[in-house]
Image (spheres, rainbow, N blue to C red):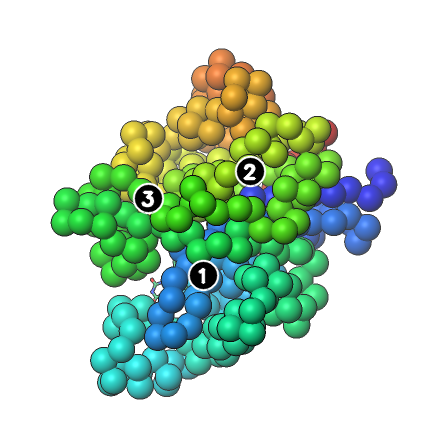
């Protein structure tokens, strides 16, 4: 097998773990590109924060806080304490000191006029990640959650309220006027394999698919498009994705999420869908929706099981 081009649509934590495993599963000749959600991004105390890009970068660099799931390992929070004392920012959202170094760099580059994709290339060049990271768009597209009390930024709903306020719907603010970042459409069109990471379908993959041009690129790529279920044994693997699925009327099951994405042959995005062994019974419903179902172990427990999942996803796409 020669050089392979693999493009992954990804959100933060789950996508980051998958990408780390995939990197271990490919050879040095292969080229892995991650098209990353920006819907969680925001301006805070003058800084542009991009949680999903940063989660992936820190994870691939071995610099992430594994226990907490986000931010840098060995982090301190002195600057955040000062911001709190001044009464600026979000007191429920902590920026670590090392992490702030990343945000200062990004904001500096943006203010010099670089688009986010170029700022990201500059920032990620610090580490040998083994994966090229491209924001799905250079435009500011931020997810807002519509609740009974009005809309709020996704980050406020998720981090401050822990998704406990019922979400009526989600709005990807600015998405209609957005365009894919340079390299995104080519990464999909020229891929040998496209993988939808086991990320939140509503607030991680949803905002990527809503950017005009991306669905069309997925529809026309000669590559096979294979997704990995973020649901195992009828439960979300991490986070509070079930609250997001409920809001869009999708039940928390491996087959319901596959049907939500839809078969590429029927106007959706998927050719194949990987489900966990505990969800083998869901395979029939997935196949009935026109999507090839593959039953494999999905738990990314350690480096070995994560790499095995990467190999399984590649095998499913051949
Ligand atoms: N999550 C939290 O639960 N509390 C925080 O204070 C927090 C800070 C934070 C700072 C930078 C960053 O990149 C991520 C951060 N996260 C925090 C995680 C983030 O809110 C979400 O988990 C993701 O955006 C959802 O994918």
**Mark number for residue 171?**
3
Q: CA distance from mark 2 to mark 1?
A: 21 Å
Location of ligand 1 given as a quarter of the image: bottom left
**First reached walking from the N terminus: tag 3 or tag 2:** 3
Front residue of this view, candidates 177 and 253? 177
Q: Secondary structure at mark 3?
A: strand
- Answer yes or no: disc 3 within 8 Å of ligand 1: no
| In the rendered image, the vertical position of residue 293 relative to residue 111, given as above or below | above
Q: Which of the 4 quarters of the picture holds residue 1?
A: top right
Tags 2 and 1 touching, CB below 8 Å: no
Residue tagged 1:
51
Percent x, y of residue 143: 36, 50
Residue tagged 2:
214
Q: CA distance from mark 3 to mark 1?
A: 18 Å
Percent x, y of residue 301: 53, 50
Percent x, y of residue 102: 52, 74
Q: Is residue 89 left or right of residue 131?
A: left
- Answer yes or no: disc 1 within 8 Å of ligand 1: yes
Residue drawn at (50%, 38%), measured in percent from left and top? 212
């Amino acid at each position: 097998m020669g050089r392979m081009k693999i493009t992954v649509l990804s959100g933060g934590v789950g996508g980051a773990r998958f990408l780390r495993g995939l990197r271990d599963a490919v050879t040095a000749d292969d080229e892995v590109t991650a098209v990353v959600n920006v819907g969680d991004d925001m301006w805070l105390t003058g800084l542009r924060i991009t949680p999903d890009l940063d989660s992936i970068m820190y994870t691939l660099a071995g610099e992430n806080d594994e226990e907490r799931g986000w931010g840098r390992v060995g982090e301190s929070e002195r600057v955040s304490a000062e911001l709190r004392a001044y009464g600026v920012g979000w007191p429920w959202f902590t920026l670590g000191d090392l992490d702030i170094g990343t945000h200062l760099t990004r904001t500096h580059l943006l203010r010099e006029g670089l688009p986010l994709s170029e700022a990201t290339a500059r920032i990620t060049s610090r580490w040998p990640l083994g994966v090229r990271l491209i924001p799905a768009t250079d435009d500011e597209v931020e997810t807002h959650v519509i609740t009974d009390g009005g809309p709020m930024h996704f980050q406020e709903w998720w981090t401050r309220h822990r998704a406990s306020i019922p979400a009526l719907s989600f709005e990807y603010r600015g998405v209609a006027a957005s365009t894919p970042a340079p390299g995104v459409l080519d990464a999909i069109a020229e891929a040998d394999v496209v993988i939808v990471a086991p990320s939140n379908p509503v607030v991680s993959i949803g905002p990527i698919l809503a950017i005009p041009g991306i669905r069309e690129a997925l529809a026309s790529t000669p590559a096979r498009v294979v997704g990995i279920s973020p649901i195992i044994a009828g439960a979300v693997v991490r986070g509070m994705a079930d609250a997001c699925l409920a809001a869009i009327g999708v039940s928390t099951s491996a087959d319901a999420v596959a049907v939500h994405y839809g078969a590429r042959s029927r106007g959706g995005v998927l050719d194949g869908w990987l489900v966990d062994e505990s969800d083998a019974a869901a395979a029939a419903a997935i196949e009935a929706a026109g999507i090839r179902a593959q039953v494999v172990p999905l738990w990314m427990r350690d480096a070995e099981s994560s790499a095995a999942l990467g190999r399984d996803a590649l095998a499913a796409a051949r």
